[in-house]
Amino acid sequence: MPETIEIQLKKGVLTLCVLALLNRHDSYAYEIASTLSDAIDMGEGTIYPLMRRMQSDGQVETYLVESPSGPSRKYYRLTDAGRRALDAQTTEWRAFARAVESVLDGQAQTAAPVPTTDDVTAERGAEQ
């Protein structure tokens, strides 16, 4: 069964959402997962592999904080590369969202069809 558009959209914006949350303040993975679960109904299990990938990509770094009620927590914070990724992805998201809105509102310009090889061949034959 194909994934719904909602699932595909969530997967597509997950990194952007995590970057935005970490731009506000450092956080640990469970807190990020809880926030995203409340905001966009994203499952907790999705966050941990994403956080590892973002760390290996250099977008986040980690540090440990002692917890009075259990083991130390691994906190994540944005790196300069993470801030650049947030800026770039935010720009891309906003442009994409505007384009989708213009299509939904019927304001998008329709592009002229791109001629195919068959069209060009037929046109040349008609000229002769």
Image (spheres, helix red, strand yellow):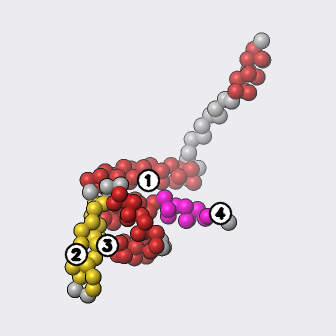
Whether residue 26 can be seen here: no
Q: For this rendering, which residue is in front, 21 or 43?
A: 43
Q: Which residue is mark 1?
A: 93
Q: Say which element carries label 3.
A: strand
Q: Which residue is mark 4?
A: 2
**Coordinates of residue 41 in the picture (x, y in percent):** 48, 73
Q: Is residue 128 left or right of residue 2?
A: right
Q: Is residue 123 left or right of residue 9?
A: right
Instruction: Name the residue at 57% across, 41% down.
Output: 109
Q: Which residue is mark 3?
A: 28
Labels 3 and 4: the sequence-earlier one? 4
The answer to whether the residues at label 2 and label 3 have Cβ atoms under 8 Å apart is yes
Q: Residues within 10 Å of mark 3 (few under 14, many from 20)?
A: some
Q: Which residue is mark 2?
A: 65
Labels 1 and 2: the sequence-earlier one? 2
Tally of numbered tags: 4
Instruction: Name the residue at 68% across, 30% down.
Output: 116
Q: Is residue 85 left or right of residue 11?
A: left
**Coordinates of residue 6 in the picture (x, y in percent):** 55, 65
**Which residues, given as a range, are shown in magenta?**
2-12
